[in-house]
């Protein structure tokens, strides 16, 4: 007698089972051709495919699917116990063709491939028993190996229609199988129900045929015919815009948008922290979105005081300044900002890997619903990596992953990056003009950012106003293409605020 596989083993494991001698194909004995009533498959269809059933009284106990080699010899059976849904095989399954391959031997215009035997019979029946339908031997897990084994058979048809299950495994299997064949050879059906048999059982044969005729030629993932965009071309719901706090910057950029990665860069002490404080508070006041913060050089306590400082118009992140206010005043500013419950900050400690950072950002976006994430800053993430021997390569990898994450989650990512130290006597702390070539470590920062905004300030200027004025220069602007100096922001030492002012510099300066 044939040996049954344990229920824990998959059907795919049948290929590894030693073949049973042909004389022991016992399941075919005492079995008959009948309707498979619970699956709505007619006797004529079952007989066409050589599918036998065994009964106990009026109850069907087993399905016997007969398999043949390429010479038309019956060499194995797959048996299904209907009570416990166990499968086992007997005979030489590894040498068998696809289920139904022996039935449809003449080449033609179409052949449809399903995942399982019942689906193949169902599809054939719904097609009016006109066109060839076959199935995989071992389900989606073995789709590629099964189709490669029967490649010559399938390739003789003009078109191969893939009708795999409407689940993740089935969709992936269809894509994998389609890539075996030449372009436009395979069409992939898009099912609304689980599989072909579900359509037959609920009497939706017409819907199945609509899906069959509507099957589209396979194209690799990521390649789309722009014609298929249709009216969705004008759907702007994918992108939310928030204007910057400074009007002249908006004139060049039209604001910041979800789905974009914007890099802010400067030398040390140019006002990056002040800019980030302003943007965090601005997003709170001008959107209803949650905001994620990963400030790698400060504690979450300092982050909280930074946000409150903008609301208070006072540098509360300095203890001596905080001490000048009452607990009631501090609590009021706390309630108006972080008390909104819309800020989520990363409480970090020690070194952290790129994947851990990406995981935190993904969690903020997908689990906490953050639409805007501020990451300050890129350089410290890379420098904190263990076994980091190539900063340029590390930045390339991290920037690529961040770009993909922005696409995946549709967040607006505001990234802070440092500049490399320039050659020559004049550094960025002296107000040197910034260019994309000054970005630290890798050209990928410029390539993968939607916008790059540089901050320039001459800290050593004799004039007090000049020493506290930051020039905002747009180095890259994919959205509008408008670059150059956007505006000038003056830092108020008393309030800690950044305010847009007219150009304070003379032509010589």
Image (spheres, rainbow, N blue to C red):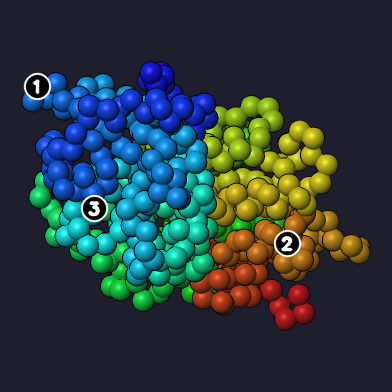
Using the numbered discs, state the Cα–Cα distance from disc 2 to disc 3 in whole angstroms: 54 Å
Seen at 69% across and 30% down, the residue is 351
Seen at 77% across and 62% down, the residue is 438
Tag 3 near tag 1, CB within 8 Å: no
From where the camera sits, is residue 267 visible?
Answer: no
In the picture of the structure, the residue carrying the numbered disc 3 is: 123
- Left or right of 183? Residue 44 is left
- Left or right of 114? Residue 262 is right
Seen at 58% across and 65% down, the residue is 451
Tag 2 near tag 3, CB within 8 Å: no
User: Is the residue marked by circle 3 packed among few (<14), some (14-19), or many (20+) residues within 10 Å?
Assistant: many
In the picture of the structure, the residue carrying the numbered disc 2 is: 443
In the picture of the structure, the residue carrying the numbered disc 1 is: 57
Q: Nearer the viewer, residue 229 or 496?
A: 229
Seen at 44% across and 65% down, the residue is 156
Badge nearest the viewer, 3 or 1: 1
Using the numbered discs, state the Cα–Cα distance from disc 3 to disc 1 in whole angstroms: 29 Å
Q: Is residue 197 above or below residue 318?
A: below
Which disc is residue 427 wearing? none
Element marked by disc 3: helix
From where the camera sits, is residue 405 visible?
Answer: yes
User: Is the residue marked by circle 1 packed among few (<14), some (14-19), or many (20+) residues within 10 Å?
Assistant: few
- Left or right of 504? Residue 392 is right
Q: Nearer the viewer, residue 169 or 450?
A: 169
Quadrant position of residue 117? top left
Element marked by disc 2: loop
Where residue 71 appears, as percent x and y from the top left, is 45, 50
Q: Nearer the viewer, residue 179 or 423?
A: 179
User: Is the residue marked by circle 2 packed among few (<14), some (14-19), or many (20+) residues within 10 Å?
Assistant: some
């Amino acid at each position: 007698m044939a040996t049954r596989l344990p229920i824990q083993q998959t059907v795919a494991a049948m290929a590894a089972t030693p073949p049973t001698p042909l004389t022991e194909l016992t399941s075919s004995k005492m079995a008959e051709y009948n309707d498979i009533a619970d699956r709505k498959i007619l006797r004529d269809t079952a007989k066409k495919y050589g599918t036998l059933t065994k009964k106990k009284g009026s109850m069907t106990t087993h399905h016997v699917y007969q398999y043949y080699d390429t010479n038309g010899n019956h060499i194995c059976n797959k048996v299904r116990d209907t009570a416990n849904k166990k499968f086992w095989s007997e005979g030489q399954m590894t040498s068998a063709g696809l289920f139904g391959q022996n039935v449809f031997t003449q080449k033609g215009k179409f052949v449809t491939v399903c995942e399982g035997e019942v689906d193949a019979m169902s599809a054939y029946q719904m097609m009016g028993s006109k066109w060839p339908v076959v199935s995989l031997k071992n389900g989606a897990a073995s789709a590629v190996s099964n189709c490669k084994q029967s490649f010559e058979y399938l390739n003789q048809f003009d078109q191969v229609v893939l009708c795999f299950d409407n689940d993740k495994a089935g969709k992936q299997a269809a894509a994998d199988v389609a890539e075996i064949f030449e372009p436009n050879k395979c069409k992939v059906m898009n099912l609304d129900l689980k599989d072909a048999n579900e359509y037959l059982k609920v009497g939706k044969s017409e819907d199945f045929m609509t899906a069959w005729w509507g099957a589209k030629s396979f194209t690799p993932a990521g390649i789309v015919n722009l014609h298929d965009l249709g009216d969705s071309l004008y759907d702007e719901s994918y992108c939310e815009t928030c204007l910057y706090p400074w009007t002249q910057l908006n004139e060049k950029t039209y604001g910041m948008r979800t789905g974009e990665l914007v890099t802010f860069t400067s030398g040390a002490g140019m006002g990056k922290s002040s800019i980030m404080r302003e943007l965090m508070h601005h997003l709170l006041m001008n959107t209803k979105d949650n905001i994620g913060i990963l400030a790698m050089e400060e504690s979450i306590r300092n982050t909280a005081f930074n946000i409150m400082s903008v609301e208070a118009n006072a540098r509360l992140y300095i203890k001596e300044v905080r001490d000048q206010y009452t607990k009631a005043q501090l609590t009021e500013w706390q309630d108006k900002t972080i008390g909104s419950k819309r800020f989520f900050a990363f409480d970090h400690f020690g070194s952290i890997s790129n994947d851990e950072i990406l995981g935190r950002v993904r969690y903020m976006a997908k689990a906490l619903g953050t639409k805007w994430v501020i990451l300050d800053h890129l350089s410290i993430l890379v420098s904190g990596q263990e076994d980091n021997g190539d900063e340029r390569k590390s930045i390339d990898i991290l920037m690529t992953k961040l770009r993909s994450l922005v696409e995946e989650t549709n967040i607006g990512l505001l990234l802070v990056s440092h500049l490399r130290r320039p050659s020559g006597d004049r550094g960025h702390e002296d107000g040197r003009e910034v260019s994309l070539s000054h970005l630290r470590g890798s050209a990928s920062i410029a390539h993968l950012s939607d916008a790059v905004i540089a901050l320039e300030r001459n800290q050593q200027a004799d004039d007090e106003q000049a020493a506290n004025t930051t020039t905002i220069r747009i180095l890259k602007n994919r959205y509008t293409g408008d670059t150059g100096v956007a505006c000038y922001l003056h830092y108020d030492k008393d309030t800690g605020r950044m305010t847009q002012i007219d150009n304070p510099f003379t032509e010589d300066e």
